Amino acid sequence: MFYEPKKKNHGLPKNPFNSLVIPRPIGWISSIDTEGNFNLAPYSFFNGVCYSPPTVMFSAGAGANSDNTKDSARNAENTGDFVCNMATWDTREQMNQSSATLPQDVDEIALTQLTPVKSRMVKSPRIAEAPVHLECKYLKTVELPGWNEKDVYKVIFGEVVGIHIDDEFITKEGLVDIAKIKPIGRLGYNDYTLTDLDSIFTLDRPA
């Protein structure tokens, strides 16, 4: 089949695009607003973009508030930082719950009964139940043009200035034990994927 995304002429029950760029890591972003309220939300348009300095991005669509901006994006822009917490099999339910559209002052960390932990380099809290945290300093926002005024997309870039890894997940050889962590990733529709010992394989890069 062939279709043009702008024409939406795929003829399928749901837009297949999100099922074609997969699997996507989940940026489980914790942040704080100018009033001191915590926020937590998952973003599947998320990834690392460069290595030195380590930099990540997440893309936020239109928000439900009057400024049409998602809380995570607004908080990063206004306070200058955010934290990316690794979403895992053990925290999958809380991650999903934190995706709900809620009033701006609702603390999703408290709502999902997770534990906020003070960060070392930034003001935003970390999530204690996550095995990995990337403390990020806000770098810049890139606004992407949409098809209409309601299509508002902001790509938020942050430099990773502090990294926490639970010692439990570091092997004797000094490697991160991804199979033991069991991170989850986003597929299309309402589907996710799990990284575990059965799904990992190794390929040596050519010389």
Image (cartoon, rainbow, N blue to C red):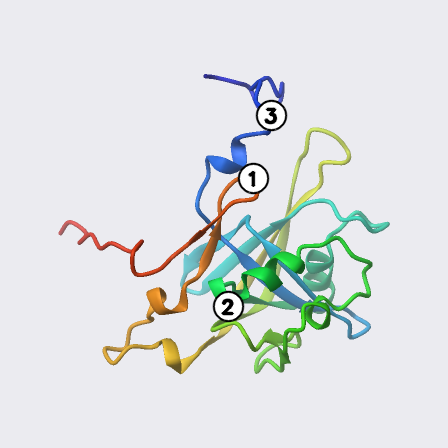
Q: Is 71 on the left or on the right of 127, as rendered?
A: right
Identify which amino acid the numbered label 1 is placed on. Answer: Tyr
Q: Position of residue 141 (x, y in %)?
A: 64, 52
7 vs 110: above or below: above
Q: Identify the residue at horizontal 82%, vertical 58% (top origin).
A: 103
Amino acid at pointer 3: Pro
Q: Please report whichever mark, 2 or 3, sits nearer to the chain's N-terminal start.
A: 3
| Callout 3: SS | loop
* Residue 120 percent coordinates (x, y): 57, 82
Category of crowding for the residue at label 3, using alpha-carbon neighbours closer than 10 angstroms: few (below 14), some (14–19), many (at least 20): few
Residue at 41 percent of width and 63 percent of height: 182
- Identify the secondary structure beneath mark 2: strand
Q: Which mark is residue 160?
A: 2
Query: Is 207 on the left or on the right of 140, as rendered?
Result: left
Q: Which disc, if any, is residue 189?
A: 1
- Residue 13, numbered circle: 3
Query: Does the residue at mark 1 contact the one at mark 2 (Cβ under 8 Å)?
Result: no
